[in-house]
Amino acid sequence: MLSSSVSTLLTPAAALGLALITAYYLGARQSRRFRMSNFKSHVGGKEDPVMQYILNHSLREHPALKKLRLKTMEHKWNPMMVACEQSQFMANLARLVKAKKAIEIGEAETFDFVFIDADKQNYDHYYERSLQLVRKGGIIAIDNVLWSGKVLSPAEDDLDTKSIAALNKKLHRDVRVNLSMLTVGDGLSLAFKL
């Protein structure tokens, strides 16, 4: 029988592992590669003293998860990893809605929480499918909605940025959800299904 501390650790670790594997396969088409430092958020990070203060005074990371995150930072696909403060925030949201079932994208059933962080050109498709999968009152969390600020003025040939910007406009008008767009990580939209 597993101890409660090990059991508590396994669920987020399994979710992180699944997210990393999914990100690896979905990210294989991405050409953008860069490295993040150990405690760097997608927005600001070590260069931003306010963001560093937030991380130092709010991030609660189990030593095993920290070890996993640091090991992942060594992988060439580390940019696909969700920012640590964003991961903690979404875990708190899942606790808030007492989520028993969460999905990153895929299975048919009614879920409490959906997290979309995949190829950007299909974000609208994932969002529409998520609306079918998530229960009323559930949350659809959409990552990278600021896309390093590129959504402010998408280049004509940048299909990823144009897709994200189009979804942001759609979300703003969508009467099926209540919406909050946050500057957590590289931008996180929370769509609460009505």
Image: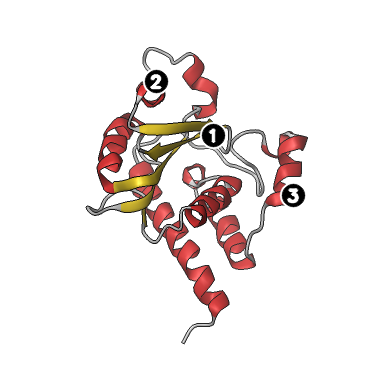
Q: Mark 1: which secondary structure?
A: loop
Locate residue 141, reporting x and y percent. 43, 41
Q: Nearer the N terminus, badge 2 or badge 3?
A: 3
Up/down of 12 relative to 111, above or below: below
Q: Which residue matches tag 2?
A: 169
The numbered disc on residue 186 is 1
Residue 168 lies, in percent from the top left, at 41, 24
Give the x, y percent position of residue 35. Answer: 57, 41
**Quadrant that contains the C terminus:** top left
| 26 up-or-down from 94: above or below | above
Q: Is residue 72 left or right of residue 62?
A: left
Q: CA distance from mark 1 to mark 2?
A: 17 Å
> How far, Cα to Cα, is label 3 from label 1?
19 Å
Disc 3 residue type (three-letter): Asn
Q: Residue at x 71, y 38 (%)?
A: 51
Q: Give the side of residue 130 with respect to residue 21, left or right.
A: left
